[in-house]
Amino acid sequence: MRLHKLEPDFYECEFCHEPITNPICLACIAEEVNIWSSIYPSLRKEIMPRLRRYIKKLKRDSLESANCIKCDKDLISVCAYCFVRYILGELENIKANNIVKKEFLQFFNYDLGHTSFN
């Protein structure tokens, strides 16, 4: 996979092909998910290893990146919206209940100009 550079300092998400306008790295978002999921210990045990594997795979496959505005480390070539959508899919895969998924979307609403989570 390759991150598409649109203009100097602007990058395109390799999944949705939209500009990455909220350059927060997946590791920072995953850390926020880790903190949020601490109130759901069994869910946390299932979701966090999945997120770590996914991030590791994306880091291995990505060639270019920008800096994260939070930690100033590399930004993987996936926008926050697509990563949150991936996490929601993983919550569905592990059969998280609807209340948990709704709460997740309240905390991690990265619907920045995209359609929405349906």
Image (cartoon, grey):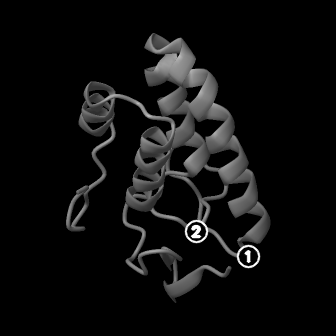
Residue at the (56%, 23%) spot, across then down: 44
Q: Secondary structure at mark 2?
A: loop
Q: Report which residue position mark 2 lands on.
A: 77
Asked whether 57 or 113 is in front, the reply is 57
**Outermost residue toward the right in this view:** 60
Q: CA distance from mark 2 to mark 1?
A: 8 Å
Location of the N terminus by quadrant is bottom right
Write down the quadrant of residue 39 in the picture.
top left
Q: Report which residue position mark 1 lands on.
A: 63
Q: Is residue 21 left or right of residue 113?
A: right
Write down the quadrant of residue 4 in the picture.
bottom right
Q: Earlier in the sequence, mark 2 or mark 1?
A: 1
Residue at the (30%, 33%) spot, across then down: 107
Write down the quadrant of residue 61 in the picture.
bottom right
The disc labelled 1 sits on which kind of residue? Leu
The disc labelled 2 sits on which kind of residue? Ser
Asked whether 80 or 15 is in front, the reply is 15
Q: Is residue 6 left or right of residue 109?
A: right
Q: Secondary structure at mark 1?
A: loop
Disc 1 crowd, CA 10 A, few/some/many (<14, 14-19, 20+): few
